[in-house]
Structures are given as C-alpha cells and as structure tokens.
Image: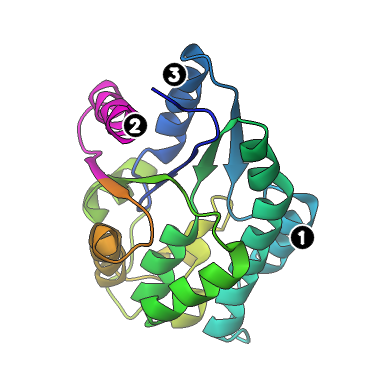
Amino acid sequence: MHLGGRFIVIDGPDGCGKSTQIGRLAEWIASQGAECVRAKDPGGTEIGDRIRHVLLGYDLSAMAPHCETLLFMASRAQLVAQVVRPALAQGKTVLGDRFISATCAYQGAAGFPREQVIEVGRWAVGETWPDLTIILDVPPEVGFARTGRTPQSGRRRDDAAQLALLNDARTDAMERRSLAFHRQVRANFLDLPRYYPRPVEIVDATPAPDAVFEAVRQAVERAFQ
C-alpha cells in the first residue's frame, strides 16, 4: 500500500464523528510508515485563520452567499499552497479535515449550484484535489443527538449556510437551521460520488467508533493497495 504523497479528506454532517476518526486514521497512517500532515479546513494557516475569524462573526446577514463561498475557497487556496502541496511534494500523507466536499453539501443546501462550487474550487486549488474523500454518513437526528444540539423546525437562514463548517461557531447559529436543511446537507454528501472530480467513499458512521474506523481503514486500503 502506497500512502506517501496521498491526499485524504474526511468529511460529513454535524455529529458524524469526524474528529475521532481523523485522529485514529492519523495514528494508523503513521503505523504504516508514512509521515502524516493534518490540514484543517477552513483555516490551517495564518492567513486562513484570519479568513476564518471573519466567518466567525456569526451574524452573516450582510454577507452574500457568493461572498461567503469565496471566503471559504480563499482559505482553501492558501491551505493548499502553504500546507498541502509542499507536504505532498515531500512524499508525506496529507489528512484533511473537510474540503470542497463540505461546501458542496452545506452551500448546496442553501441553493448555491454545485457546478459553480466545483468551478470555483478548481480555480482555488487547481489540480490539488483529494485522492480519496471519505464521507462519514449519519442521519441528522443521530448527529444532533450526539452533539446535544436541537435544530429548529422553522425556516433556516440562507445567509449562514456554511457556519456548520466551523467547529467553534456558536450553538445558536447552528440551531437556526431547520432539520430539513440538515437532511438536504446529508443528501448532498451522499450524492457526491456521482459528480465530485475525485473518488468518494461513503461510510456508515452510525455504529460504534471501532466499527466505523474499520470501515474507514478498509476504504483507504482499497483506494491505495
């Protein structure tokens, strides 16, 4: 199995267990003799963190969805240029925490055409797309039970469509989104293999963490054996 010089992304809806599986996968990659570099999106660089700070203003009512999407892509452009490409060039394995797949899901649920997400993504990161994206799939009801949040049943806020990509966003910003919005996010993640430019694997993340990790590990082995 050849993990050196590979770019792997873990993504999925709120409460999917992403942080747990990224940590375990990083340890496993190291056990296979590859040096693992982690890349957090959005942010992950000094400039990217400044952009993240803008997005963490919580009240994005004055920000157009196109502006919001471009800010996320700008952060990714810097992350790829400063972290991802240099690490891959050195033969290291890059393990990403979210990427353009997340914008396809979250901004797509707000009505931003996925074709435009992919087009802007290509401009932002060029050919540096993940060799494998693993989507940890959970129903929104399960995800919210895990996080302790309760989405509102009312209409979501389109102008804050991507705040769920920010782990340190305020809970009340999350709760402004309806359950219907989160169901659409999940549907968008599940639809990724049909049009995403690079391979996507869907992993059921509802079982216990050990079982989920076994499925994640097998997905990686299938991709790079």
Q: Relative to 210, does residue 148 appear above or below in the rendering?
A: below
Image-quadrant location for residue 53? bottom right
N-terminal-most mark, 2 or 1:
1
In the picture, the quarter occupied by the C terminus is top left
- Please state the horizontal and vertical placement of residue 171, each as a whole percent of the image: 49, 57
Q: Name the residue under label 2.
A: 220
Quarter containing the N terminus: top left
Which quarter of the figure has residue 40?
top right
Query: Tag 1 or tag 3, which sits nearer the N-term?
Result: 3
Is disc 2 in contact with disc 3, using a CB cutoff of under 8 Å?
Answer: no
Of helix, strand and loop, which one carries label 1? helix
Q: Where is residue 213 in the image (x, y as percent from the top left)?
A: 31, 26
Q: Relative to 124, is 144 on the left or the right?
A: left
Residue at 66% from the left image edge and 38% from the top image edge: 89
The span picked out in magenta is: 202-225
Q: Residue 28 carries which label?
A: 3
The alpha-carbon separation of the residues under discs 2 and 3 comes to 11 Å
